[in-house]
Amino acid sequence: MSAQSRAATVLRDEVLALRPYHVPSAAGLIKLDAMENPYRWPPELTEQWLGRLRHAELNRYPAPQAPELTERLREAMQIPAQWRVMLGNGSDELIQLLAMAVAKPGAKLLSVEPTFVMYAMIARYLGIEYVGVPLREDFTLDLDATLATIAAEQPALIFLAWPNNPTGNLFPVEQLEAIIAAAPGLVVIDEAYEPFAGQSLLGRIGEFDNVVVLRTVSKMGLAGLRLGYLVGAPAWLDPIDGLRLPYNINVLTQITASFALEHKPILDAQAAQLREARTVLSEQLQALDSIRVYPSAANFILIRCLGKAADAVHGELREAGVLIKNLHGSAPALDQCLRVTVSTAQENEAFIEALREALSG
Ligand SMILES: *Cc1c(COP(=O)(O)O)cnc(C)c1O
């Protein structure tokens, strides 16, 4: 028997249908496709960090509960003592653990569409039924449809990216409250873009018995570390933490993230700069009449090409040395849509120049 036919007999059908998550090469390009923070640390901070790493005990397993890092997170993010903090190898891992935790036969996972693709992908990996409620044409939430679908489907788990990715908008908090009140199970508020949004449900977890807040350090400037955190009541997080593989946060990440959080004002200042740059870039984009610009509370902006095809615009930007995300073809609602990460003034300028050029040609 060939390896191929043996694998085809043994592997689950949904696994055989999977393709690896494709990340295009960004070599030599201005990288505006993945919501990364463009700023580096000042040289003296890098020196201090390297000094801290000198004491890393690479021969030892990492601390399973990462107590020091958890303490730094509690201080830096003002997490009340009554809530548990669970760490993940990126918030992607926490999304996976949450889904695993509810995966009884027949359990459903619900979100809105379009949203962060990992919710549906992870549901598929685990054989959980995924229900996506379409957003309106302008990407606002269709509350009536969402509440009706919750009532009909009774999802065990609801994910709401707040602000939403890839649309960038922040649903009104009253709509979140209505969804939370209607949900029969757990609601995860995914606040990956909290540094750019100015709104959070973290301080209000205690008002509900079915809300946990998911965060990550990725979009605030530490994407390379792979560190996400989940905040919520012990009744939810203690059992779910049992699913976590014991050493999921490595020694280097624990040391580095603790160090970075001690210097959080630097990261906060970078986020403030990016929020200002977002305003400038939005205005520049709005001045172009062959695109539609969607409002953003995150560190990226979604646009829709109204004349020239998004594929062509994306390709010409790439030719000009600028990589953004082409969402055209990923979902009908994202027809002719492109997403650009807000970056430094210089990189934003290079992008807007290249875009003007592409749209005029
Ligand atoms: C980027 C993103 C994440 C993933 O964060 P990691 O911690 O890097 O895994 C989670 N949720 C949303 C909505 C995102 O856009």
Image: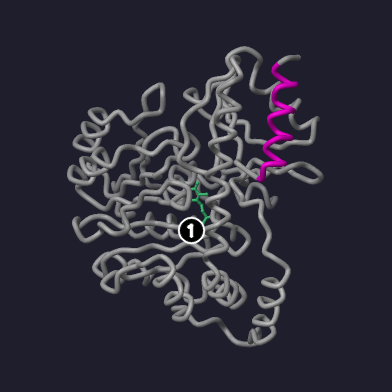
Q: Count all numbered tags in the image, as a single digit.
A: 1
Q: Which residue is mark 1?
A: 216
Q: Would you place residue 306 above or below residue 298 in this image?
A: above
Mark 1 is surrounded, within 10 Å at the Cα level, by few (under 14), some (14 to 19) or many (20 or more) other residues, namely: many
Instruction: Tell me which residue sits at (34%, 60%) in the image.
Output: 101
Q: Position of residue 290 (x, y in %)?
A: 60, 15
Please identify the quarter of the rendering in which residue 304 is found.
top right
Q: Is residue 23 left or right of residue 13?
A: right
Q: Is residue 55 or residue 274 the one in the foreground?
A: 274
Magenta-drawn segment:
344-359
In the rendered image, which quarter contains the C terminus? Answer: top right
Q: Is residue 310 left or right of residue 106?
A: right
Instruction: Tell me which residue sits at (70%, 33%) in the image.
Output: 351
For the stretch drawn in magenta, what is the main secondary structure? helix
Q: Would you place residue 360 above or below residue 264 in this image?
A: above
Color scheme of the displayed model: one colour
Q: Is residue 218 or residue 282 the one in the foreground?
A: 282
Q: Secondary structure at mark 1?
A: strand
Please identify the quarter of the rendering in which residue 257 is found.
bottom right
Which residue type does callout 1 highlight? Thr
Q: Is residue 185 left or right of residue 14?
A: left
Instruction: Tell me which residue sits at (58%, 30%) in the image.
Output: 327
Q: Is residue 355 magenta?
A: yes
Residue projecting furthest to the top? 307
Q: Would you place residue 28 above or below residue 63 in this image?
A: above
Q: Position of residue 239 (x, y in %)?
A: 30, 69
Q: Would you place residue 126 above or below residue 86 in this image?
A: above
Q: Is residue 361 magenta?
A: no
Mark 1 near ligand 1 (CB under 8 Å)? yes
Q: Position of residue 133 (x, y in %)?
A: 34, 32
Q: Position of residue 194 (x, y in %)?
A: 43, 51
Instruction: Tell me which residue sits at (61%, 43%) in the image.
Output: 19
